[in-house]
Image: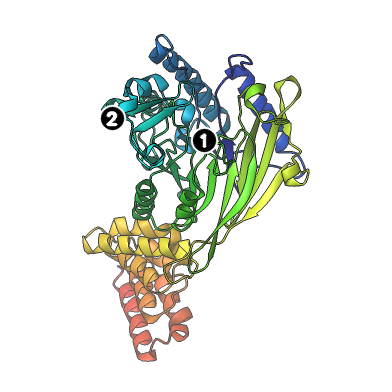
Amino acid sequence: MFSILHISDLHRSPREPISNDELLSALAHDRDRYVDEDPPVRSPDAIVVSGDIIQGVPLKTPNHEDRLKEQYQTAKDFLGQLAAIFVQGERYRVVDVQGNRDIDWNTARNAMTLVSVDDMPSDLPTALFQEGSLYRWNWKTRELYVINDPELYAHRLDAFSDFIHEFYSGVSGLLRVSGAADANLFTLCDGRIGIAAFNSCAGNDCFAYHGLIPRQAIARSDLDLTQATAAFDLRMAVWHHSIEGPPYRTDYMDIEIVRGMIGRGFRVGLYGHQHKAQAVAHQVYLPDRETMAVVSAGSLCAGSRELPPGVHRQYNVVEVADDYRRARIHVRSMGVANLFVRASLPDFAGQSYADLEWEPAKDPAGRPINPEVLRLQADVDLAERQLKEGNPGGAMRILLPRAKSLTGYPRQLLIDAAFQAGAWGEVIATTDPPRSIAELMNRFEAAMRLRDRSTARDAIDQFADRVGLPIVQADELRRRVTADESLGR
């Protein structure tokens, strides 16, 4: 299995603060418990943080930029130590996304001006609620604002961007990470899991609380992941906003956005925002039914006034099965003395975990995609190019890890590369045993180049009949070995 520590909503309540040391100690001790529980939980191999890294600051906060920097410094220290405890300090295994609290409300407000009653649009609801609208309504003062400085407005996530830049500075193994991007791309599990970490805060600010991921961001991430490798066993998406909410709320995201992910092969979605754990399977009907496991983590640090009734601070451990088609979601809940234990959830029939399954991604013809076949084809194509460009050693390095499982043309390509590189030992190892006359001849010739006459003779004696080598040709090769011995070479 591959295990993910899924945490969310790290904002610290001023009324009920909790320190980094308390959190780290509680998480570490909980891991020591759950690895031995029944059922046991695998120690995390990666960390996903699904938004709201900080508490944020209200409007009209003096020195708001300094306050944001202080909060992000606390978050950076926490996540750095968390990575050291859980993933050997390897920050490429930590996935961060922004949430609504990461937005600098003061910068957003400074980019707006008040609209007079005379200048209001005639159809105000349409002007307010169309995607990409520059109008904002303040319900507290019942006033209309318009974003008149889009360039300044675009800087409302600069503090988060600085945090991302500092946290990942000098980190290798990242696919594509930038604090200002609509989506960052990560790879986990030795390249078998591809992750798109989406900013679901498009158009979100001090007056607009909705979640939105631009459709083009999802499409671009799909193309970029495919270009990186079409052979991910599992595509995962991470964002912040919840995808369900009552009609009188506006702080959630349209489910159609998630369906767009499903249709592009994403099979697991991790998010936060709603401050409670939830695990469901969403479906989309294209040519065939396709499903996605959508999982919410509760808040790791929120105070009691910010949590739903009856819900405590929570986090998840997501165990992805070896076939990349199933996952078990374990929910941990904070109880006595700020320590985490297994949760008991009505939504999970009183258990602390839930199991989810999903349909494998399919090609345009509706057939399940076999990532291993795609990976092999990609390696063969690359090795073939290396060989044609006169780099047989490069071709060997690509194919050797697969040597035992190669058949047909890929196997012969490895033998040709080893032969051209003069790697006679690799030729002999790969042709053990030879599966064709050509392989037998390669094995024989490699042994002769190494002056290993015993291996050369054994190759003919043991395998000539098996591969169908004509007797005349086999006898000629034996005479060659004898002649070589007589010459003392």
Name the image quarter holding residue 427: bottom left
Q: Hey, which residue is sitting farthest top in the picture?
A: 62
Q: Which amino acid does label 2 sit on?
A: Pro
Q: Is residue 238 above or below residue 105?
A: below
Q: Which colour scheme is used?
A: rainbow
Q: Could you say where residue 302 lies in the image, as x and y percent from the top left? A: 61, 24
Q: Where is residue 183 in the image (x, y as percent from the top left)?
A: 39, 41
Residue at x 78% of width, y 43% of height:
350
**Callout 2: SS:** helix
Q: Position of residue 466 (x, y in %)?
A: 47, 84
Camera-nearest residue between 266 and 328 = 266
Residue pointed to by mark 2 = 150
SS at circle 1: loop
Quadrant where the C terminus sits is bottom left
Mark 1 closeness class: few <14, some 14–19, many ≥20 residues within 10 Å: many
CA separation in Å, label 2 and label 1: 22 Å
Residue 251: which numbered mark, if any? 1
Front-lying residue, 62 or 74: 62
Q: In which quarter of the image is residue 110?
A: top left
Is residue 179 in view from this perspective?
no
Q: In this view, does 294 lie to the left or right of 343?
A: left
- In the rendered image, which quarter is residue 146 located in? top left
Q: Identify which residue, 110 or 228, lies in the foreground.
A: 110
* Label 2 Cα crowd, 10 Å radius (few <14 / some 14-19 / many 20+): few
Mark 2 or mark 1: which comes first in sequence?
2
**Is any part of residue 326 visible from this angle?**
yes
